[in-house]
């Protein structure tokens, strides 16, 4: 969904033709995977989404003005009028790559803050903006300009045949609310990690990423509040799935797959995922390449596969395959989508280090982790860790039931760091990332836990929930600007006698 579309309505014949084109593209792609030369430089890429707030820490609908001030193609709209996204340049993990990633994230947050301040607002990278409320999400002003957002909104509602229903358990009964749009998607801001690889390596990388999704979500959880209530530690997971759920409830009850999807099996080829996308999911934006004025084939270049790429962008797997025809040689990427934005630049660089190092290590094991773990077990661990965060117990091969914090400290973080060293990351960079990850896991102080404990302390001091969320968001922004990892951020002083 990163590209603009040319129209917002489509005829039956256009939909039928689009389906035929998708099937033809699958045949072209299958043959191309077997015979083409792809870039294989092991480079990484990062996308970071963030939110804008006003002086009262409430959502600020100033994205268009802030983007105009930034005036840079590396900064773009996201679906919400209070959202921004920045795309970092491609880089390598070798040497000081992760240090440069941290520095670039810090510089971009500072630059966005400077641009936002020109319009009386501030920027914050966090999984869910804690001060977001139902009033804004029920107001048409929530959505950013762009026909792709308009058509996505209409397509999901048309397919459902009824409003979007958000049901997430938590305090005071959790959330049970309806929306006449996909507005809850705008609440979900993330850091997306990309890893380039050769076709023959993709299946192992994807399986590895799926296997560690639970511990990865627990370690990075940073989205405990939504619409004023404390819910899951990483509430983005159920919120995003439900916000873009195009299924009527009866289809969900029948087992029809959601468009935001963990998957259901280990794979043997990247092609498996594209084939599932075409087989299981109807097109919601059936815009043909003719509408986009894009050819299928250009002599001497990789096939553009417009329809297949657009369709792939409307199936939101937590680990998604990406085909990019490029300008000279095509390349393939694994896109990891389950991380929230924030808390600080060093936290985000360390989270990237954990993912990239873990995938590399697990791909090189003689007996792969996923051969010892059921896919259903990986999915259950992912959901449990999103729900309970760093306090989760998971079942793990050879260990049985174990606290995820112990699993991270004793096994997964050390192995991820070993993977980074094998890639060629500088020793001091690996040491810095390991110190942050181990500190966060050992203290069990993730971004989610810091938010929860801070709000609780502020409420004990006499604040109501609305005021406590605003005060916590202000403290969060200060912590983010400090550059310190979240497990070192201070908590409010306890009131006397508490």
Image (cartoon, rainbow, N blue to C red):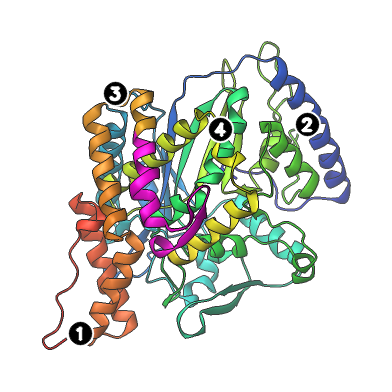
Q: Earlier in the sequence, mark 2 or mark 4?
A: 2
| Secondary structure at numbered mark 4 | loop
**Which region of the structure is painted magenta?**
389-417
Verify whether residue 190 appears in magenta. no
Q: Earlier in the sequence, mark 3 or mark 2?
A: 2
Which residue shows up at 53% across the image and 54% down it?
A: 145
In the figure, is residue 376 to the left or right of 108?
Answer: right
- Residue 331 in the image: state x and y as whole percent: 57, 23
Q: CA distance from mark 4 to mark 3?
A: 29 Å
User: How would you rate the neighbour count of disc 3 (Cα within 10 Å): few for under 14, some for 14-19, many for 20 or more?
Assistant: some
| Secondary structure at numbered mark 3 | loop
Q: Nearer the viewer, residue 148 or 105?
A: 105
Camera sees residue 298: yes
Between disc 3 and disc 1, the foreground one is 3
| Secondary structure at numbered mark 1 | loop
Find disc 2 in the rendering and name its residue. Answer: 26
Find disc 1 in the rendering and name its residue. Answer: 461
Find disc 4 in the rendering and name its residue. Answer: 367
Query: What's the mark number on residue 95?
Result: 3
- Residue 431 in the image: state x and y as whole percent: 24, 36
Query: Which residue is most to the top?
Result: 300
Q: Quadrant of the N terminus?
A: top right
Verify whether residue 404 appears in magenta. yes
Q: CA distance from mark 2 to mark 4?
A: 31 Å
Which residue shows up at 21% across the image and 53% down it?
A: 481
Which residue shows up at 57% across the image and 22% down it?
A: 198
Do labels 1 and 4 touch, CB within 8 Å?
no
Between disc 4 and disc 3, the foreground one is 4
């Amino acid at each position: 969904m990163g590209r603009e579309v040319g129209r917002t309505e489509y005829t039956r014949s256009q939909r039928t033709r689009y389906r035929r084109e998708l099937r033809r593209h699958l045949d072209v792609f299958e043959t191309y995977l077997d015979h083409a030369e792809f870039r294989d430089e092991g480079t990484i890429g990062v996308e970071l989404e963030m939110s804008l707030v006003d002086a009262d820490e409430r959502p600020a609908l100033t994205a268009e003005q802030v983007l105009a001030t930034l005036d840079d193609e590396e900064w773009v709209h996201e679906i919400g009028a209070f959202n921004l996204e920045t795309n970092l340049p491609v880089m390598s993990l070798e040497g000081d790559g992760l240090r440069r990633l941290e520095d670039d994230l810090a510089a971009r947050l500072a630059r966005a803050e400077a641009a936002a301040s020109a319009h009386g607002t501030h920027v914050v990278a966090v999984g869910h903006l804690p001060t977001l409320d139902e009033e804004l999400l029920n107001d048409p002003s929530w959505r950013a300009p762009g026909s792709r957002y308009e058509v996505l909104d209409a397509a999901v509602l048309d397919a459902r045949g009824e409003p979007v229903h958000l049901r997430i358990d938590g305090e005071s009964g959790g959330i049970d609310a309806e929306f006449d749009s996909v507005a809850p998607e705008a609440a979900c801001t993330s850091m997306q990690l990309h890893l380039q690889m050769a076709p023959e390596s993709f299946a192992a990388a994807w399986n590895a990423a799926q296997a560690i999704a639970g511990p990865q979500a627990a370690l990075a959880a940073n989205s405990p509040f939504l619409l004023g209530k404390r819910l899951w530690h990483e509430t983005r997971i159920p919120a995003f799935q439900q916000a873009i759920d195009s299924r009527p409830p009866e289809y969900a009850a029948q087992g029809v797959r959601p468009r935001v999807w963990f998957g259901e099996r280990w794979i043997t080829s990247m092609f498996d995922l594209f084939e599932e996308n075409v087989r299981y999911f109807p097109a919601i934006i059936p815009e043909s390449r003719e509408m986009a004025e894009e050819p299928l084939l250009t002599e001497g270049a990789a096939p553009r596969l417009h329809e297949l790429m657009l369709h792939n962008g409307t199936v939101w797997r937590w680990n998604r395959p990406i085909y990019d025809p490029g300008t000279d040689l095509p390349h393939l990427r694994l896109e990891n989508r389950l991380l929230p934005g924030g808390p600080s630049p060093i936290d985000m660089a360390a989270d990237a280090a954990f993912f990239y190092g873990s995938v590399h290590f697990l791909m090189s094991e003689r007996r792969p982790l996923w051969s010892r773990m059921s896919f259903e077990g990986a999915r259950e661990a992912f959901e449990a860790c999103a729900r309970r965060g760093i306090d989760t117990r998971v079942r793990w091969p050879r260990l049985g039931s174990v606290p995820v914090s112990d699993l991270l400290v004793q096994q997964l973080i050390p192995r991820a760091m070993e993977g980074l060293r094998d890639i060629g990351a500088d020793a001091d960079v690996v040491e810095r990332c390991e110190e942050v990850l181990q500190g966060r896991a050992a203290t069990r102080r993730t971004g989610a836990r810091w938010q929860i404990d801070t709000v609780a302390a502020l409420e004990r001091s006499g604040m109501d929930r609305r005021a406590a969320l605003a005060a916590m968001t202000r403290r969060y922004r200060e912590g983010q600007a400090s550059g310190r990892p979240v497990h070192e951020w201070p908590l409010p002083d306890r009131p006397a006698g508490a």
